[in-house]
Amino acid sequence: MACNSLNMKKKINLLIGFSAVILVVLSAIQYYLVKTTYEYKVEQFRSEIKAKIAKITNDYSDIDTTIFNKKDMLYKQLAENYIRDKSTRFHIKNALLQNEFKSELTRKLQEEFQNEIPDLTIDFAIVLDKFVIYDATKEADTIFAEKPFIENKLYGDLASLDDAFLIRNYVGTTSGSLKKQELSSDYKLLTEDTLYVSIKNWEFIVLKRMTLLLVLAIFSILTLITLFVIALKALIKQKKISDIKTDFINNITHELKTPLTTLSVSTKILERKEIRENDATFSTVLGTINRQNNRLQNLIDQVMTNSLGYEEIELHKEKVSMPDFLNSIVNDFQIAYPDISIAKELDTQKINLNLDKFHLTTAITNVLENAVKYGCKNIAVKASLLNNEFSISISDDGIGISKSKHSLLFDKFYRVEQGDLHDAKGLGLGLYYVDQIIKAHQGTINVVSDLGKGATFDLRFLI
């Protein structure tokens, strides 16, 4: 039996582990699919923005020809100044970045974006990348060439390139001729700048486009987790039932062995002629047989009676005067257990409750015997009226019950462990029976206890 239980535990643990791995794998696949879709949607969104803005800015001169003529004139002037005087190299960059038409062009481009794409809030920056002069008298002279930095912003109100994406590069060429030392010099000017834009709340816009997918993904993950938790709880419950079943079988086997062995020995003794001829010895052995037979019958009755749920228990209710009824139970128990100190605090007010005296007597006695079984020396029984309920409180100073075990306390066949052993005898049906009887009376039972601090059982009935 122990081997079968161990194999079942291994199978359950293996199944739990395998299910957990499958859940993790499926979650990882779901995450990968959502992430891939998100990246695709981001690229799709950026492509749409690029196409729209590129169409607007295809030719800056369409926005304001005068301003762009000024820009071209500035570029030519700076290039020619450099050809005439090389010392102007270090002033060119500042002159480009601090141009007089910077704010005006920024405003006009911003208005164009707002008119053409009103549903988006766009910040932009045009960043200078290169400024190269090709002088006919010498090789190309690179005045300026850097990677895109926001500090090299020509126009726009974008504060950083970190969250921006590139729309397009613009390469401009200008040709010119100027006299230098009585000689005509032809030159070409190449400039390159890049347009970056940032869309406010663009992540939210992309996620909004993925709403259906996200809802389905979250729903599927939650469904998987829910199913896993349900399956896990079912497996754990099955494991507990298996453990309780094994323990019950072992315990009842032990309980049955003693009377059966005694009956077997007694029967063999009765087969002996000298025993049959001795009336006193014969009567003693016969008495032993009767007692062990009654014990077997009591064990069978206990299992049969306590196997019923509270819905199946047939109660024979009658008017019962409280607390006299409770007082009689405690007095009878005190006679059976004279070594146990019992303190009574019973409300003297007469309360009549409609109860089944037999079943309730057995239930309360079971709670008292359970306290003795688990090492108590003192018991306190209290009865009182609380909010239209009659309360019976039974406290003991026994070994107590760990809080983690409270939820199992009233389960069928469950017995409180002491360490890793079940030292107390019994079938684990006593408190289950108590719980079923209280429920059959539409009452409630609660336990307050901790390991090493005794236990208090509170039984309540509606008046």
Image: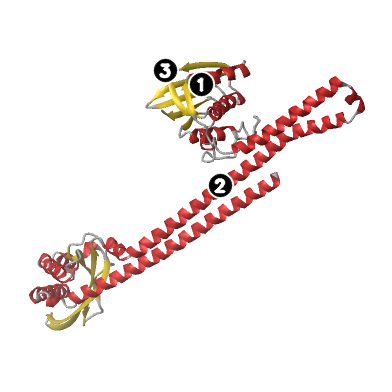
**x, y percentage for residue 314?**
54, 37
Instruction: Mark 2: give few (<14), some (14-19) or many (20+) Cα within 10 Å.
Output: some
Q: Earlier in the sequence, mark 2 or mark 3?
A: 2
Alpha carbon of mark 1 to alpha carbon of mark 2: how far? 42 Å
Instruction: Mark 1: give few (<14), some (14-19) or many (20+) Cα within 10 Å.
Output: few
Q: Earlier in the sequence, mark 1 or mark 2?
A: 2
Residue furthest to the right in view is: 273
Image quarter of the C terminus: top left
Residue at 86% across, 29% down: 270
**Residue 352 falls in image quadrant:** top left
**Residue at label 1?**
325
Amino acid marked by disc 2: Ile
Residue at 43% across, 63% down: 32
Alpha carbon of mark 3 to alpha carbon of mark 1: how far? 12 Å
Amino acid marked by disc 3: Gln
**x, y percentage for residue 55?**
20, 77
